Each structure stands twice: as structure tokens, then as C-alpha cells.
Image (cartoon, rainbow, N blue to C red):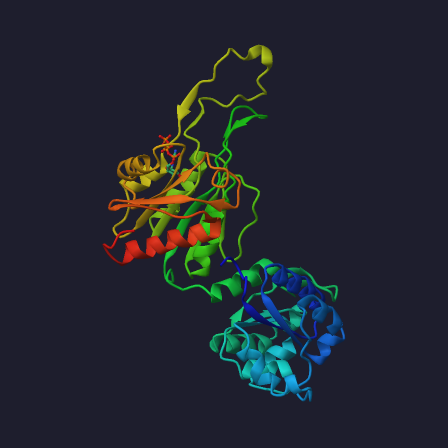
Amino acid sequence: MPGLHGKRILLGITGSIAAYKAVEWLRSLVKEEADVTVAMTEAAERFVSPLTFSALSGHGVHRDLFDEAPDRVMAHINLSREADAILVAPATAQTIARLAHGMADNLLTAAILAARIPVVICPAMNSFMLNHPATQDNIRRLESFGYRIVQPNSGELACGEVGDGRLADWDAAREALLSLFQPDDLKGMTVLITAGPTREALDPARFLSNRSSGKMGFALARTARRRDAEVVLVAGPVQLSDPPGIEVMRVTTAEEMRQAVVGRAAVADVVVKSAAVADFRPAAIAGHKIKKTQYGGHLDMVKNPDILAELGAHRPLGQILVGFAAESQDHVSEGQRKLREKNADLMVVNDILGVQTGFDVETNQVTLVDCRGSVALPLLSKEETADRIWDAVVQLRSGPAGI
Ligand code: CTP
């Protein structure tokens, strides 16, 4: 089941100007088919009408601790019983202080105090309020309770100042929610992932590259982070934004990718080479655009370094090395050959000719190949495929069971 589909989320909205952004967040949740119930504080209602949230969520908005409607009695207890997670966005300094001190003087804080489900808090406020030792202390207290804090962004604030305190992006909050529903079986591990194509210049106007979109590598990075790994992502030129909580190194050429990867591989517990590295590059880069009249009918090319093979030859003890193989035929035998030749633990073979498995699509159908055999996975989203690859990595790390 992909993403937040079917998850029951209690969305708590408190009195910050950023409450208007919660409207968009609610829409995103509903689009993903999460089942969202909204609870608002009195101050939040001054910024956005409860009607907006009830219309978008399809449920009445919970507002009052002492509501006498029959279905609302004991709402502060029932609200969290009927949810899988609580998301407080935006969370004001006031609500954070209340929660830090166990105060249950409104419906939302009472519901959170009574909850036995995960809580995600997204602070939003003026930067002086945020950086005040009282607020910082309160946020640390919330962390010590096991609440997950989605740190606010820096930038222009509604009060006209520039600084910390802007509500985080939805992407960061969504990742925090998704991680609640994942095992933390990559905790304590550093994983290094490569993604996308490389680009090899021919002259100032032209380059050689391939059709890799980077989506599989970015899906691997996001899913590893959700499973609590420290993630370093080395990405070739792709149209994808940095996933939250991940160190992203942007490179262009195979040689730049090699340098970035070799520099970080020694301390990685797992390396996944999902990048489509260009095997060849032009022997020389022309300083000026090559004119039609200068072109003699062929290009001189030289081989690029094989990064995976280099990693395989010098891998530290215990490191798990995963390669990808883009194939149009003989998938398993080609996977086995590359596994051996590059000294990898696992090869993920994908069929580049399939309509739903080739370049730049949202789905993939891969075969996992290790020294014991192979397993063909069904057609899945790239994130689901990524999770199956991590399952295989966890198995490889824990013993000789094989895939
Ligand atoms: N790879 C690499 N450096 C290269 C070429 C490939 O690190 N110069 C890695 C890829 O990231 C992938 C694996 O090697 O993990 C296999 O890549 P693939 O393009 O399928 O295979 P090649 O080694 O290029 O072999 P062939 O051209 O015979 O298919």
C-alpha cells in the first residue's frame, strides 16, 4: 500500500498565521487517500474557518473539550484511539509549551496527552519566539517524550522578519509521517546511494548522456531515510529536488561521481549504485562549439572508470555493495556476470525495454540476483521496489539466508 493511503491522521491546527498552509497539507493528505480528522484550537479558528477543514476532510472539525454532541463526548480520548498518528501543524509556541508541561486545557492538547500513538510536531512562529530558551527547552522536552519534531525552515516570516520559524515544507512533514509506519531496521547505518545519469561534455554546447531520470535512486534514498539510515545521495544531473533529511551531492560527470563516491564509500555500511554511469566519454572536450564543417564523421571516445568495480575491489570488511544492471535481454545471467565481475553482494536487474519498467516512469519490475539465486519482484512503484531492496540488504547483513 503506497504512501499514506488508508492511514488515519489526526491533524491538529493551532493559532499561527501558517494555519492557512494546513489547508494545502490537508488537501495533499486527502489526495493520497489518508483519512483525516481535524482538531483546531480556538486561536486557529481566528486564522482559518473550521468550515474549510470540514469541507476538505469530509468530517466535522473537533473544537471543544466540552462539546455535548453525543458523538463528541470524551472526544479527547476517542480522537487518538481512532487515529494512527497525530500531526500538529502549525504548532505555536503556546501549544508546544502546553504539551511540554502536560497541560490539557483544550481539546487538542488533551487528546495528545491521552494518546498512545506517534505524534509529529511542526513548529511555526516568529524566530525570536522559536529561539527563546523557553521554547527550545520545550521542544527538547517534546523530543524526550518521543514526539517527532519537523524543524521549521528559514526565510521571510509573516511578521516581516527574516529567520527561522517558517512552517516546514509538506515534503518534510510527509516524510516524518511515513517514517512512523516503517521499521527502523537501517538505524545506525550510513548508506551511500548514487542516482541519475552522468553527462559527458563534447563541446560547450553538447554532451553525451542517457535517459535515466534518477527516480529509482531518489526512491532508495527516501525509503532508507524513513528506515532511519543516515543517507548520502550522489546525484547526476536530474530534475528532482533534494529529499528532506538527506545529504545530497550533485555531480555531472562520471569522474566527478567517482570522486564523490570513493571519498565517502570507506565509511558507508551499504553502497547502492543505481546511477546509470556513462561508460564512455569524448576523448577531448572542444574549447569551442564544433562546427559542422569541422566534424570528420567520427568521435574519439575513452572509457570511463567503472565505479562499482572499483568499490568492489577495495571494499571494507562487512560493507554491503549493491549494483544495478540495466538489461534488455538475458537478465539473470547478465546480473550474475556483473555480480561476479564487480564483486557485489546484490544486483538489481531491470528491463529497460518494458513500458512500465524503463526510463522515467513511476514503476519498476526488477529481479534481485545474489550469489545464491534470483527473485523476480512484481511490478511495483519505485518506492515499493526500493523497500524490497532494503529488505534484501537487511537480510544480507543479518546472515547467510540469501534472497
Ligand atoms: N557502473 C559504474 N561505473 C560505470 C558503469 C557502470 O559504477 N562506468 C555501475 C552502475 O552504477 C551499475 C552497474 O555498474 O550499478 C552496472 O551498470 P550497467 O550499465 O548495467 O553495466 P555495465 O558495467 O556498463 O556493463 P554493460 O555495458 O556490459 O551492460
Q: Position of residue 374 (x, y in %)?
A: 30, 45
User: Which quarter of the figure has residue 174?
Assistant: bottom right
**How many numbered marks, from 0 up?**
0
Residue located at (58% from left, 21% from top): 288
Does the image show residue 259?
Answer: yes
Q: Where's residue 277, x and y in %? A: 43, 35
Ligand 1: quadrant of the figure: top left
In the rendered image of this protein, does residue 236 appear above or below residue 7?
Answer: above
Q: Residue visible at 51% across and 62% down? A: 178
The image position of residue 220, as x and y in percent, is 45, 51
The answer to whether 351 appears left or right of 211 in the picture is: left
The residue sitting at 69% across, 89% down in the picture is 68
Does the image show residue 100? no
Q: Is residue 358 above or below residue 375?
A: above
Q: Nearer the viewer, residue 338 or 358?
A: 358
In the rendered structure, the answer to whether residue 365 lies left or right of residue 171 reads left
Q: Quadrant of residue 38?
A: bottom right
User: Where in the figure is residue 385, as x and y percent of width and height?
Assistant: 43, 50
Q: Quadrant of residue 327?
A: top left
Vertical placement of 384 versus 161: above or below? above
Examine the rendered structure and indicate whether residue 52 appears above or below residue 317: below
Q: Nearer the viewer, residue 325 or 206?
A: 325
Q: Residue at x 64, y 63 (%)?
A: 25
